[in-house]
Image: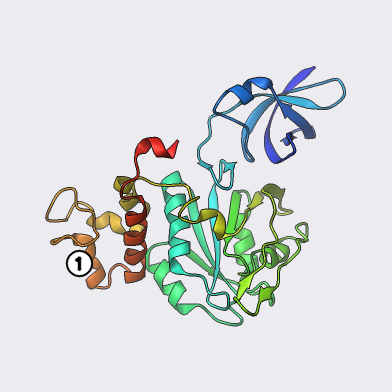
């Protein structure tokens, strides 16, 4: 028996597939993890013990630099949010929920406007470039912008998220043929896509780096999203930072208080009103949340 370091690419039915220098090894987790609050998740860097038959056991998990709870994935360098101004149009609130989670977890964020061959998404582009995000216009159908996005993914561990039907699977197929994912059609009645992603898995790119495809935005809805305490939420909106210490009163919630520097910046066009509206809705949803509820 020998020990090796690696990281978990996927987990199915109690088996974990760990990428090591000697290849991908099928592992089980030691019983101690069933009795602890820390269980292996996709992206974990682990120490494994390789058995004589070539399978292994996960012995320990290295400290994580970040972790998403739903979907369960760790050690993400950047979260890639795929959205669209073409049907089904992505609501800014959905984007802002996920950007807030990423900012809170210390992940970089890329905003990707897909279907730009149908609608350039100028309004979305303006909102998120003003907020300080890298924004890419792409088309999975024509290939526009795919090369520039692929370059940004090289050498990093990236997680993709997007509302159902936005073309996330088609975009992943365009980025790397290795994905060959089933793509969902749009329901004419609801203008929403049919879910095609069933589990989280890290897939290696030919150009280097890994991508974790995740379920649609429904995994981030108000009841199930990774929650943020109300006092921390202001720091998850990066464009608020220059104004946080300029409010007239301490403890300002930046919702409807008089003398709020952030509200003033919104009125002056320095912060997009859509971003502030999202902040207010998210603030209301976690206003009474207690720290123990995050556990």
The residue depicted at 51 percent of the width and 70 percent of the height is 90
Image quarter in which the N terminus is found = top right
Q: Is residue 272 left or right of residue 48?
A: left
- The answer to whether residue 85 is above or below residue 178 is below
Q: Quadrant location of residue 189?
A: bottom right
Residue 196: give x, y in percent of width and height.
70, 61
Q: Quadrant location of residue 92?
A: bottom left
- Front-most of 289 and 143? 289
- The answer to whether residue 17 is above or below residue 223 is above
The residue depicted at 31 percent of the width and 47 percent of the height is 288
Q: Quadrant location of residue 132?
A: bottom left
Which element type, helix, strand or loop, lies under badge 1?
helix
Residue 151: give x, y in percent of width and height.
62, 59
Residue 157: give x, y in percent of width and height.
61, 47
Residue placed under numbered mark 1 in the picture: 264
- The answer to whether residue 146 is above or below residue 33 is below
- Front-most of 172 and 186? 186
The residue depicted at 55 percent of the width and 59 percent of the height is 217
Q: Is residue 199 left or right of residue 268?
A: right
């Amino acid at each position: 028996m020998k020990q090796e370091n690696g990281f978990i690419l996927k987990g199915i039915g109690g088996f974990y597939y760990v990428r090591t220098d000697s290849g991908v090894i099928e592992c089980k987790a030691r019983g101690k993890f069933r009795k602890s609050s820390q269980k292996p998740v996709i992206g974990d860097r682990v120490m494994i013990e390789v058995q004589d038959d070539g399978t292994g056991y996960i012995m320990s998990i290295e400290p994580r630099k970040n972790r998403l709870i739903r979907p369960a994935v760790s050690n993400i360098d950047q979260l890639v949010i795929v959205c669209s101004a073409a049907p089904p149009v992505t609501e800014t609130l959905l984007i802002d929920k996920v950007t807030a989670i990423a900012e809170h977890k210390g992940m970089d964020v890329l905003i990707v406007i897909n279907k730009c061959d149908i609608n350039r998404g100028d309004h979305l582009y303006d909102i998120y470039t003003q907020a300080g995000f890298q924004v890419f216009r792409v088309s999975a159908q024509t290939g526009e912008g795919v090369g520039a996005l692929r370059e940004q993914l090289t050498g990093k561990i990236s997680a993709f998220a997007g509302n159902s039907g936005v073309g996330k699977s088609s975009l992943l197929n365009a980025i790397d043929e290795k994905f060959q994912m089933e793509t969902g059609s749009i329901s004419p009645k609801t203008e929403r896509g049919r879910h095609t992603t069933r589990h989280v898995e890290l897939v290696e790119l030919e150009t280097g780096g890994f991508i974790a495809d995740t379920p649609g935005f429904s995994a981030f809805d108000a009841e199930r999203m990774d929650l943020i305490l109300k006092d921390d939420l202001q720091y998850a909106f990066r464009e608020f930072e220059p104004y946080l210490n300029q409010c007239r009163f301490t403890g300002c919630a930046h919702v409807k208080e008089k003398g709020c520097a952030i509200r003033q910046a919104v009125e002056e066009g320095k912060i997009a009103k859509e971003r502030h509206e999202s902040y207010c809705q998210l603030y209301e949803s976690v206003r009474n949340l207690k720290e123990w509820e995050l556990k």
